Image: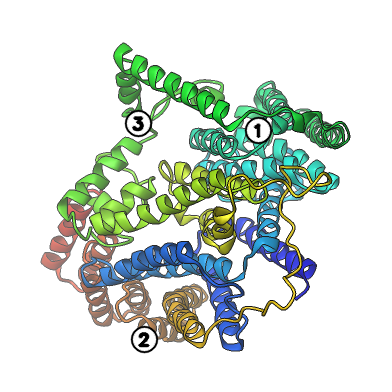
Amino acid sequence: MDITAAKLLTAAAAFVVIVYLALSGGGYDIVLRSEIGILIWWAILLGALVGVLPRRQIRTGGWVALTLLTAFLAWSWIGLSWTSSHEQTLAEVCRLSTYLGVVVLVLGVVRAGTAEALLAGLAAAIAIVCGAAVLSKLAPSLFPANAAASFYHTARLSYPFDYADAVGEFATLGVPLLLYFATSSRSLLGRGFAAAGAPLTLLCLAMTVSRGGFMALFIGVIVFFVLVPNRLGRLPVAIVIAAAGAALLAAVIARPALRDSLAVAPATQRHSLLAITLITIILAGAISVVLAVLGRRLRQLRRVSVSRRTARVIAAVIAAVAVLVIVAVCVHGTAAQIWHDFKQPNPVSHSDQYFRLFSAAGSHRYQYWQIALDAFRSSPWHGIGPGTFRFYWSQHQTLDEFVLNAHSLWIETLAETGVIGALLLVAFFLFLLVRGAVAALSCGHRQRPLLAVATATLAAFCAAAAFDWVWQIGVIPMVALAVAGVIASPVGARAGAEPAGAAPAGPERPADASPTPGPAPAGAARWRPSLPARALLGGGAVVALILIVIPLTSTVEVRASQAAATGGRSEQALSHADSAHDLEPGAASPLLQRALVLEQLGDVAGARTAIAAAIAREPLDAQLWRIASRIATESDRPRLALADYRRAHQLDPFYPAA
């Protein structure tokens, strides 16, 4: 395939997948997420069968990353032998199979010429989604009536994920990518669009008022500037973007009805902010183009350079200052005060919600993490079972709050998969962060910016995942794992092998420009995957497809049963519930659905049998015991009903006791 066509196809595929998932609730739903997983693994399987995948030999770094993530998936799958919920654990295995597919596909497809196109597709998708999110506040009439509604009932921007923090952290991943293209793109138009999209993305982050998003932004930008070459040359554009973002933030804060109101803000405030936003992003894009032209013609920005030795001295001074600040904070007692504030359930109420950015209150995270660590201590080696934190929380919580996730990927993984699972997942991300940083710092200028932005984006995701349940919102980890695939791909290996002192490509090529692959050496044979490699890839694709299809089809059948029951089609409802049970015999929800349909039909004995079978598969779900108590009451078995009711109360103490 022609390299230009390959670039366009790569960018378009990344753009479409991310926009589709993001505008479909973020890919939280198992059906939407699994559809993408099936498409990815089918592409991998067909590519292996016809001999076009992998397109490049996977190097050692890629195999290490694949081994770690595959081992984590396998460990989660083995967790079916001790979990308290076969259904929830298999759903986690399904999720991991989709995520693994992203890494495998990127590793098998991406090369030097298409890596940048992949990142361009991701950056454009994030900017478009952030623009749609902002418009949901400023022009709500363009969206469905419930588009901007939030389950959490908050004035913070939560469209399209219905979770403000996740929207902010998704926007954060786009900032390093857009900053890279605004300072590295060979096209002036590309630089202008990226520089215009970056303030819009910052505005989206600001309107979510996400503290985790701002923290991840800080980390991502710092990592980018630490690793990227020609930092001073990129600084003017970065300052323009930051100034534009700050101006938009000030404009939002100056409009209290738009800033804090749960209702639709007055048209004057919405329309004025929309006009300011358009003017600001156009100016930011235009100024960045002017700076790029000046930099190319006058060469002044490129002559501003710092030797590697001087850079190391500056970095050492900055690190020493940071250490001194941390020591001073600890000695002064500020750290203890921050920790005390973090334990508080919520930030202090204020008429201006932006004051929450200055609060260290954990918004119940301290309590979530306490329970998760208790769960880990109850089973330190293999954990309580992937996907089962919700049941442990219900039984041991003190907040009277319905919670599914521990709001930290790392702590929840420790609780659900134990030491072994946590080490595997942490090792996967840590290996890629170190590999990306080392490759970016040790290679020449040609690949360094690409690896720098990929590593910065991954670092921002890891920071966000430490404080939120972004792992469950499929579109966010898919972006992170796509850039992880770039780091682990032969692009990173080739960059790491390039001599540290390699010179730029010539006077017509800026030192910070992205690489353009040249023609293959004369007589060089095109690399073709070996039969064992294709067999391994194809076999893995078949297994992954099975792991995705089983919980997906079972979920679809249960939902079809629910729809049929709602429509009064009881026979169809029972048929769909039975099909779901046949597909996933260990799942509780098909049996629960069967019990509810039989109860509706007046077959109390059949309902009692079905709900007992559901409880046997998910014994820690308080909801099942409550329904069993109700069915026992209808069966005129008061003692059994009381026993089931009390068991439900034990599993969920905040449910009213008998």
Q: Quadrant of residue 41?
A: bottom right
184 relative position to 312: left or right: right
> What's the residue at 76%, 33% (across, down)?
302
Residue 457 in sight here: no
Q: 422 and 340: which one is in front? A: 422
Label 3 and label 1: CA atoms lie apart by 41 Å
Closer mark to the observer between disc 3 and disc 1: 1
Q: In which quarter of the image is the N terminus?
A: bottom right
Up-down relation of residue 225 to residue 534 (above or below): above
**Residue 189: x %, y % from top left:** 85, 46
The disc, 1 or 2, on the residue closer to the chain's N-terminal end is 1
**In what element is the residue under mark 2?**
helix
132 relative position to 63: left or right: right
Q: Report crowding for label 3: few under 14, some 14 to 19, many 20 or more residues within 10 A (C-alpha).
A: some
Up-down relation of residue 486 to residue 340 (above or below): below
298 relative position to 366: left or right: right
As drawn, the label of residue 231 is 1
The residue that label 3 is drawn on is: 345
**In what element is the residue under mark 1?**
helix
Q: Which amino acid, mark 1?
A: Arg
**Residue 290: x %, y % from top left:** 86, 33
Label 1 and label 2: CA atoms lie apart by 59 Å
Disc 3 and disc 2 in contact, CB within 8 angstroms? no
Q: Report crowding for label 1: few under 14, some 14 to 19, many 20 or more residues within 10 A (C-alpha).
A: many
Q: 245 and 237: which one is in front? A: 237
> What's the residue at 21%, 51% (across, down)?
376
As drawn, the label of residue 368 is none
The residue that label 2 is drawn on is: 582
Q: Which amino acid, mark 2?
A: Asp
